[in-house]
Amino acid sequence: MANSIYGELEQLGKTGGAAQTPEEAILEYVKNPRPDSDYVVRFTCPEFTSLCPVTGQPDFAHLVLDYIPGETLVESKSLKLFFQSFRNHQAFHEDCTVGIGERLVKEMAPKWLRFAGYWYPRGGIPIDVFYQTGAAPEGVWVPEQAVPTYRGRG
């Protein structure tokens, strides 16, 4: 594996848990094997959790990440562990959603990124937060996220 694009990864194939905070979490990236092709990568995390910064109660969200890679791809295990690092993180929905999108854009430098947090109700009101870097490049198929408005999401 040392000669592959995966040779530098520290988390893939190893045991270990998530960082205690998002700031401590390490997102790993690999070289995009198809940098001259525009294609969409989608990750879905239907069981994201964080904590309300006021009450300390858990908040739950269905996250959807769509991006068109530039020179790098985010490694999926590191993304999973990054998401898990929010379990004890206290922040409002908007801060979690936009902060994740901004960090990915800063570190990964995708050609385009769209990130959505479909949050389950807090106080009877679901909150959906969307972050996008601009219009997707022309000619790229970007499927709908297909997460319904709240009706007992599942």
Image (cartoon, rainbow, N blue to C red):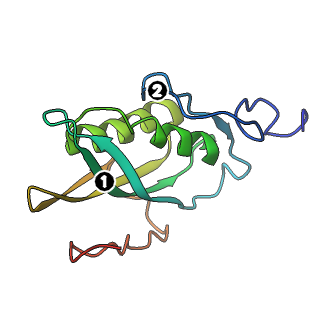
Indicate the quadrant where residue 136 lies.
Answer: bottom left
Rendered view: 88 above or below 118: above
Numbered disc 2: secondary structure = loop
Q: In x, y percent, where is residue 120?
A: 24, 60
The residue positioned 86% from the left and 40% from the top of the image is 4
Q: In x, y percent, where is residue 67?
A: 48, 53
The residue positioned 55% from the left and 34% from the top of the image is 18
Numbered disc 1: secondary structure = strand
Nearer to us in this view, 64 or 131 = 64
Horizontally, is 134 left or right of 2 in the view? left
Specify the farthest residue to the top.
Answer: 24
Rendered view: 38 above or below 20: below
Amino acid type, residue under disc 1 in the picture: Phe
Count of labels in the image: 2
Q: In x, y percent, where is residue 9?
A: 74, 32
Neighbourhood count class around disc 2 (C-alpha, 10 Å): few under 14, some 14–19, many 20 upward: some
Rendered view: 145 above or below 5: below
- Residue that label 1 marks: 60
Nearer to us in this view, 32 or 55 = 55
Q: Is residue 80 visible?
A: yes
Q: In x, y percent, where is residue 153?
A: 29, 73
Horizontally, is 5 left or right of 133 in the view? right
- Residue that label 2 marks: 20
Amino acid type, residue under disc 2 in the picture: Gln
Q: Which is nearer the N-term, disc 2 or disc 1?
A: 2
The residue positioned 9% from the left and 62% from the top of the image is 124
Horizontally, is 9 left or right of 122 in the view? right
Q: CA distance from mark 2 to mark 1?
A: 18 Å
Which image quarter holds the C terminus?
bottom left
